[in-house]
Image (cartoon, coloured by chain):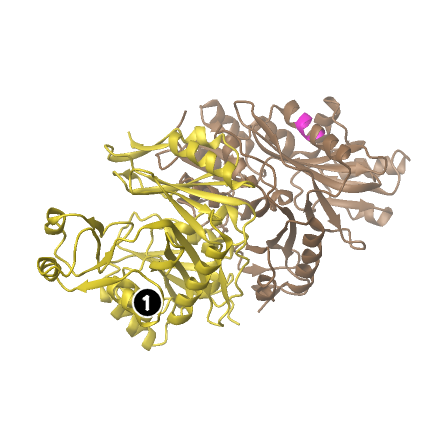
Chain colours: A yellow, B brown
């Protein structure tokens, strides 16, 4: 068994954003040496990893050269140059998650084909290499409004997803490869985080629920455990495990799903890394998703995914109308509330809707946590000076 | 209210050891800029703080010049140049804990006088400016064996404390200022961590118990909650609060106490910072002692000190007979056990009895946690290559 702890072993991480930053808490706890590559010299990880390298994650040479300096390579963002990863893997660099899985996941079209090919339940879809093909389909009555449009590549945090209701929406879509899906009426949006190590050990975290704002179509709270029927939760865990099994995945996989009005589970999309839907685990779980990511990619025994207490997460995004040096208005007020933990990602500049941090609310009682979460959301505001 | 988060505010920390390192987890979470001064360029904090300065913590100029570069100064070790802190304080630098309290705490003799002057229960003691005075007392039948000898200054982690049982022990003592105490027969060694901010808000953590090895006189486990009578725990918390109140302390104070055979509480000594007896709080408490230290020195609202689950801590010290590049033998085996979290401090070289890390065991049931802790202690070993 490799000695990772206070040793010469070097873990490379592609990406130095907030996910990398929260991963660094765990590498620091275990004293695992980390090198990070990111295109932004002021990335959240820049000052707090062992070695920080500035370079474009989509550039072959930057990724390849960085990969040659580390013993094992992982990612905190999937938007990376995969040809470089393929070559590194050929040359013997250990890479988890595996480049072949990243290739499937990077493209929404490939993801959907993968689900269909492997009998994993997902919403029906069509794939268009160009916008013009989609418009052509509409003109020939093959597709009708409303439908969901998704950019095939590099959609992120709701970017690259639109609900298309009319001809104007259709004509304003970006001219890129895309998929469309039927608009599924769903009861709940759920997520399950699965971890698997190279030895084949697998764990699932409890099912979480994304609660949406009743008017704005925006996730407001991630709630663990989801307030759903036990049988639906079991089904969601099974589907998530099925995805991991069919991918032969190694690492942490966040599986986002819809619970339909008739309690079917449909896979929406997956992320091959720690995920917003698992941030609650830092405070609420026996093992945080970031520690579990480390354990899985290093082929260490996986940790207990159960919760000590209920956990709810609220994202801190930049308020509309504010750009510039960030100020967290009323942060001190939320610190007065028991079980409330803000995480500030270290981005100095706010912009409308930019993810600047999150707040976790833990409580023995999930309903009490939900009440407090609302109070937190109504109190704190991310503005500029 | 000051804006500490993602701002220009600079927190200075004197000392870059493991306590500083665990504090950095919290400053990173809140994105508070940290500058650290330490004499060792390879200190555990060196690579993971925002600014690391190499300099002797006992040197006036090193501390003074460092202090001038930060907005607020705190410590992770009390062995620092206090004259420099006095001057910095005069010149308007905010320093918590206050230099006057550090001056009392740095000297065991001053500490004991302080307890006596303020009617805080403590073991009877005598103070000797030189070893020769102590020998003289013995020769004149003023003191008799056995007694406890403590170096007056800079004893740390059990260094500088000896039980003197005979004339040979006496003559082998270091020739330094010291105090002696009656050897108190005690049932339990307890500790309470108290936090107080400048606004006067005070919180106490639950009473923890140090369980000793039945033969070796060495703490094996720190157990939270202590398995003692509720009334004794209440008394311990009251005594700890009394110390904080009498010192007019701001920051985190760990108060170590004896529970005597007749259930009296006697203060043994205090530490003005996060403490080994509070490490369990990282995994077990709603607010870790490191976050609470930050909250207290920054005059933020204090966090909830209650526990989510029971917590037990086992220190990882270098095994006898091993010196050199560290290896954590069987670390993977303890990772298999639910609720077990190792913390590796980032010291590359082990030496017999050097504090290299700790392991926290959390469980809903304290007795189950105690069983697992024993298994952990019997499994892992800190050796060299």
Q: How many marks?
A: 1
Q: Position of residue B157 (x, y in %)?
A: 66, 46
**Residue B241 is inside the magenta segment:** yes
Q: Residue drawn at (57%, 56%), measured in percent from left and top? A: B342
Q: Position of residue A134 (x, y in %)?
A: 13, 59
Q: Position of residue A214 (x, y in %)?
A: 33, 38
Q: Nearer the viewer, residue A52 or B299?
A: B299
Q: Answer with the quarter of the image where residue A193 lies.
A: bottom left
Q: Nearer the viewer, residue B34 or A291?
A: A291
On screen, residue B60 versus residue B110, left or right, reads left
Q: Position of residue A354 (x, y in %)?
A: 28, 42
Residue A68 seen in the current view:
no
On screen, residue A233 versus residue B105, left or right, reads left
Secondary-structure class at tag 1 = helix
Report in which chain the residue with disc 1 lies: A
Residue A382 seen in the current view:
yes
What secondary structure characterizes most of the magenta part?
Answer: helix
Q: Residue drawn at (24%, 35%), measured in percent from left and top? A: A323
On screen, residue B11 versus residue A82, left or right, reads right
Q: Answer with the quarter of the image where residue A180 lies.
A: bottom left
- What residue is disc 1 on? A115
Which region of the structure is painted magenta? B239-243
Q: Residues within 10 Å of mark 1 (few under 14, many from 20)?
A: many
């Amino acid at each position: 068994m490799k000695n990772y702890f206070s040793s010469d072993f070097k873990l490379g991480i592609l990406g130095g954003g907030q996910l990398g930053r929260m991963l660094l808490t765990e590498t620091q706890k275990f004293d695992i040496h980390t090198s990070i590559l990111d295109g932004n010299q002021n990335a959240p990880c820049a000052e707090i990893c062992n070695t920080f390298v500035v370079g474009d994650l989509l550039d072959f040479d930057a990724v390849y050269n960085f990969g040659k300096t580390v013993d094992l390579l992982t990612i905190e963002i999937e938007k990376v140059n995969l040809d470089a990863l393929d070559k590194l893997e050929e040359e013997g660099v250990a890479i988890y998650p595996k480049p072949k899985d990243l290739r499937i996941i990077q493209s929404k079209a490939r993801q959907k084909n993968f689900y269909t090919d492997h009998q994993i339940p997902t919403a029906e879809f069509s794939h268009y290499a160009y916008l013009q093909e989609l418009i052509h389909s509409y003109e020939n009555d093959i597709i009708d409004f409303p439908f969901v449009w998704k950019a095939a590549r590099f959609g992120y945090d709701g970017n690259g997803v639109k609900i298309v209701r009319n001809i104007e929406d259709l004509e304003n879509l970006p001219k890129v490869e895309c998929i469309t899906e039927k608009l599924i009426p769903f009861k709940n949006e759920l997520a399950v985080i699965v971890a698997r190590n190279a030895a084949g050990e697998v764990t699932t975290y409890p099912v979480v629920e994304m609660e949406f704002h009743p008017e704005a179509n925006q996730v407001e709270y991630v709630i663990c455990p989801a307030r759903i029927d036990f049988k639906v939760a079991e089904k969601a865990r099974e589907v998530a495990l099925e995805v991991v099994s069919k991918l032969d995945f190694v690492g942490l996989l966040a599986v986002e799903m819809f619970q339909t009005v008739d309690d079917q589970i449909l896979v929406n999309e997956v992320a091959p890394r720690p995920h917003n839907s698992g941030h609650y685990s830092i405070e609420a779980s026996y093992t945080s998703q970031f520690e579990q990511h480390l354990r899985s990619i290093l082929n260490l025994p996986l940790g207990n995914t159960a919760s000590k207490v209920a956990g709810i997460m609220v994202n801190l995004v930049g308020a509309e109308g504010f750009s510039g040096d960030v100020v967290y208005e009323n942060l001190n007020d939320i610190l007065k509330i028991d079980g409330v933990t803000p995480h500030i990602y270290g981005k100095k500049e706010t912009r409308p809707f930019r993810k600047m941090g999150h707040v976790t609310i833990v409580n023995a009682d999930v309903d009490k946590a939900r009440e407090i979460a609302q109070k937190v959301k109504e109190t704190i505001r991310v503005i500029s000076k």
